[in-house]
Image: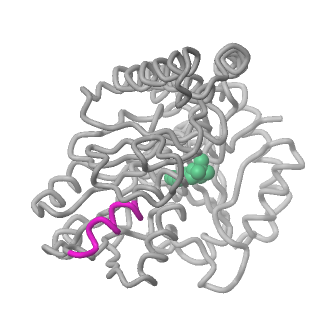
Amino acid sequence: MIYLDNAATTKPNQDVLDTYLKVNQSLYFNPNSPHQAGLQADQLLQQTKSQINDILNLNQAFDIVFTSGATESNNIALKGIAYKKKAFADEIITSVLEHPSVLEVVRSLELEGFKVKYVDVTKEGKVDLNHLANLMTDSVGLVTCMHVNNVMGQVQPISEVAEIVHQFPKAHLHVDAVQAIGKIPLIFEGVDSLSLSGHKFHGLKGQGVLFVRNIHQIQPTIHGGGQEFGVRSGTVNLPMDIAIVKAMKTSVQNTSELNKTLHQFNKDICDYLSRFQGVQIHSPQGSAPHILNVGLPGVKGEVLVNAFSKHDIMLSTTSACSSKKASLNEVLLAMDIPVKQIEGSIRISMGSHTTHEHIEIFKDKFNKVYEEVRELLR
Ligand code: PLP
């Protein structure tokens, strides 16, 4: 089986699994317990956070909160910031590029009465900086801009966005960096909060991190025992937290090398696909190398995913298989990609376990799938 769906999830590294098991066996204590074992667990929790601080060179600029994944990190941050600022800055700026764990939170805030404005997306799949500058006002309390898009891989101009946003002192910039870590260098400068998800960089599912420049900017939305600065109540999962540091260290240390390798694989696939009539590459220039969105107009994405699956190639579709425009992928629509291409789009996503051999096998199988669907291509 060739796994090319790493944007959905990645295989956990062995040392991550080993650490998780070992810590669970020997250090299963609750860091909130007042006894010796609890204190030891709490010390380890603090050490874990300071290791993350070192790995990412954060200089203690952020409070670090462990969560169950990026969905939870995004929810805690976006709702917490919006509520805190509601009285004096109740406008939110976002874009359709965002993952549903951001977009749906913003939509729910809109129903609660917040004013939401959407930044235009350029044909290259980036937030339109001029439009963003035009949308900014003194009433904007929150701006969201993801680091790398999960549908087609485009890298967003975080530094430029931060510069525009911070001309307005009440505005907070939240960045979903789930698809960026380990693939490109992370940008923290000018960012007020940032989310990560462990299973996207060879950690475990059910593990997320939220970085917040000043935790008091967040109004708690999960109430309980007051763990994690009071913004994420619930017993801390120390084995998971220690395991994620393993995954993060490996991932961050190998970013530059992996980026080069994946660029080669990406180019190799693009060169190969360019021989096939009708095949369109949707991922724009400058995208992160691990995500390649491709369209075969005339064939539904789901049909293609099934065809590849029968050849033991696991990849995914990015379009809801429907002729109704409303259910087409919003990101690709915003980039002005024709509907037929969007309907026939697939996402090939690589990771640190992807090898040259995998790419060769994928190319061979692509040829076979293409022959199978050739009649349908328009
Ligand atoms: N943000 C982005 C960009 C993602 O790709 C994903 C997962 O696909 C998430 C957030 C949500 O992560 P999780 O499912 O770990 O909560």
Q: Nearer the viewer, residue 65 or 146?
A: 65
Which of the image's four quarters has the N terminus?
top right
Q: Give the image quarter of residue 3.
A: top right
Residue 62, position as x, y percentages in the image: 30, 37
Left or right of residue 156: residue 195: right
Which of the image's four quarters has the C terminus?
bottom right
Residue 218 appears in view:
yes
Identify the residue shown where x is 65% and y is 60%. 277
Identify the residue shown where x is 59% and y is 78%. 339
Q: Nearer the viewer, residue 42 or 118?
A: 42
Magenta stretch: dominant SS?
helix
Residue 9, position as x, y percentages in the image: 66, 42
Q: Which residues are the magenta region?
A: 78-87
Identify the residue shown where x is 35% and y is 36%. 186
Taking 39 as reference, is 308 above or below it?
below
Residue 274 appears in view:
no
Taking 191 as reference, is 241 above or below it?
above
Farthest residue to the right: give it. 310
Taking 142 as reference, is 216 above or below it?
above
Residue 103, position as x, y percentages in the image: 48, 68
Identify the residue shown where x is 44% and y is 26%. 255
Q: Is residue 81 magenta?
A: yes
Residue 322, position as x, y percentages in the image: 72, 79
Left or right of residue 161: residue 209: right
Farthest residue to the front: give it. 35
